[in-house]
Amino acid sequence: MNSQRIKELLKSIKDTDIEEIQYQSGENSLYLKKTDVKAIVPDAKEATEAEVKSKNKKEGDKKLALIAIKSTMVGTFASAQSNDKPPFVREGDNIVVGQKIGQIEAMKIIKDVLSNIKGKISKILVSNGQSVEYGQKLFLVDISK
């Protein structure tokens, strides 16, 4: 495989979700892995525009502002690194921007679900091992203080 063909291959996968690729042709083989991979982070603008809901709390009539964190891909949701490890987050946990709160696996590619908001996990809407769709709500996060 010549350098021009490698450049074409790199260009073709640059703007995709592909993180790793292995190519073999005869005796030649090539293994590529992205190092600056964009993790699954919900669009903050979309979340703040459409998902802020106000509900009255029973105590003190305080407002509860909920934002949904959605899946940005189809796959299988994982709430923990492995079955023998604790979940990334539980209901009631406080989260910060950039915190890993889950994983989605599709075709042997695992992508982290990272929080783009600061708040408290109000409700986990999916279970470990559950299939998720693009745009499906995964978590409800209370951003009120």
Image: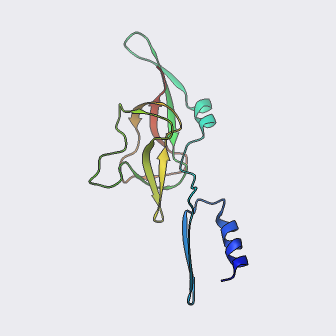
Of residues 99 and 110, the one nearer the viewer is 99
- Give the image location of residue 38, x and y in percent: 57, 52
Residue at the far top: name it.
Answer: 60
Q: Is residue 83 left or right of residue 8?
A: left
Horizontally, residue 36 falls left or right of residue 80, namely: right
Asked which colour scheme the image uses, the reply is rainbow
111 w.r.t. 7: above or below: above
Report the number of discs: 0
**Which residue is most to the right?**
4
Q: Position of residue 28 (x, y in %)?
A: 58, 86
Image coords of residue 123 (percent x, y): 39, 34
What's the residue at 49%, 26% (across, down)? Answer: 143
- Where is the N terminus found, in terms of image quarters? bottom right
Q: In the image as oriented, which residue stretches furthest toward the left?
A: 84
- Compared to residue 14, the image places residue 129 above or below, namely above
Q: Position of residue 64 (x, y in %)?
A: 46, 21
- Taking the spot 51% from the left edge, 31% from the top edge, the residue there is 67
Image-based side of 116 in relation to 120, left or right: right
- Examine the rendered structure and indicate whether residue 18 appears above or below residue 89: below
